Image (cartoon, grey):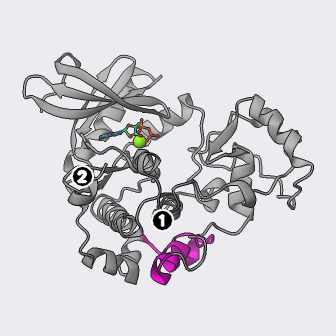
Amino acid sequence: YDLRNEDMKELQELGQGNGGSVKKVEHTPTGKIMAKKIVFIDAKPSVRKQILRELQIMHDCHCDYIVSFYGAFLSDPTICICMEFMDKGSFDGIYKRIGAIDIEVVGRVALAVLEGLTYLYDMHRIIHRDIKPSNILCNSSGQIKICDFGVSGELINSIADTFVGTSTYMSPERIQGAQYTVKSDVWSLGISLIELALGRFPFSEDDTSDSDLSDLEDLEGTLSPQRPGSLLGIPLPPARKKDKSGGTSKKDKRKSKGVSLQGGGMTMSILELLQHIVNEPAPRLVPEGRFHKDAEEFVDNCLIKDPDGRQTPKDLLNHPWIVQSRNSSIDLEVWTSTF
Ligand code: ADP
Ligand code: MG
């Protein structure tokens, strides 16, 4: 496709995310339906062209578990990335619509993500860097594919420069400023799988440890975890023990400043959450025994806090739960027709 903005007829807004939005469009010369991601980039023309060049690698990514790339172009002051439209949307939207996802389907999600990650790394030495339910998409043929991987170093830098935000799917080592590796994606997968299987974000109500962040108030809203260095180089304060009585007013104060994170009735500041991820035991599929042992163990493996002890996506493809999911007779095309 030779893509130009004038040829894109906007049909529907699909969603908004960090630093951009995604629209369902029709490429009028061909009638092809696409998803057009619009990313605002505040950078010099040379940098913008460099990003566009780097994005071309996506033309070489051909894998059943990766959303297809149709092309990208500059449209001042944005960069548009056109990709395969996935008509059932992303898994965050799906579980919010239909509730907790059946564990057999979650197994297929795990398989698809591991296959996609293994392909990206083995064939292109690409690390995804942003695995989360909103970047795992589904279509009515029952296919599951990942999108929004970090192909362009310049794009990653530019978004980190212009956009202020944080990812709560980040591994403990990333929060502490270590280099990204494929194992960081495995952690994010583990968090995402729990979220889908439970139908809620795994860090919630009862297992939050409140802590005194008063000396860090000024940092709130300036976290830019895409960069190396933990929280702009300032080490996280040690977590305190649970303090149910004194925690409420502090939380409310932060809530009013608008830097809180909501999910399933929970409110926790980003800093509290990042601190929690680093200092507390990793979340698990709960309650114990509700899910098959193999599923529990797989998720536990993804969420080993020390990256040295955590397996790579390729290793995990051999895990019994994944082998089982591959052989399972569940028909995802039928499943997608239920919502
Ligand atoms: P985020 O992934 O942080 O939610 P994005 O800007 O990447 O933010 O995407 C916004 C939303 O658009 C996603 O949550 C997803 O539901 C939807 N979306 C993204 N890409 C596609 C696609 N290729 N097909 C269908 N929907 C998509
Ligand atoms: Mg996305």
Vertical placement of 231 versus 5: above or below?
A: below
Question: Could you tell whether 203 is left or right of 255 in the image?
Answer: left
Amino acid type, mark 2: Ser
Residue 175 lies, in percent from the top left, at 65, 54
Vertical placement of 234 versus 279: above or below?
A: above
Tag 1 residue: 186
**Residue 23 quadrant:** top left
Q: Foreground residue, 121 or 44?
A: 121
Residue 313 lies, in percent from the top left, at 40, 70
Residue neighbourhood size for the residue with mark 1, other residues' Cα within 10 Å, grouped as few (<14), some (14–19), many (≥20): many
Q: Which residue appears at 34% of the width and 68% of the height?
A: 111
Residue 202 - label:
none
* Residue labelled 2 has its Cβ within 8 Å of some atom of ligand 1: no
Query: Is residue 14 in view from this perspective?
Result: yes
Tag 2 residue: 337
Q: Which residue appears at 39% of the width and 48% of the height?
A: 94
Q: Foreground residue, 91 or 100?
A: 100
Amino acid type, mark 1: Val
**Chain part drawn in magenta:** 291-312
Question: Could you tell whether 191 is left or right of 133 in the image?
Answer: right
Residue extending farthest left: 30
Residue 237 lies, in percent from the top left, at 83, 53
Residue extending farthest right: 246
Query: Is residue 32 one of those drawn in magenta?
Result: no
Secondary structure beneath disc 1?
A: helix
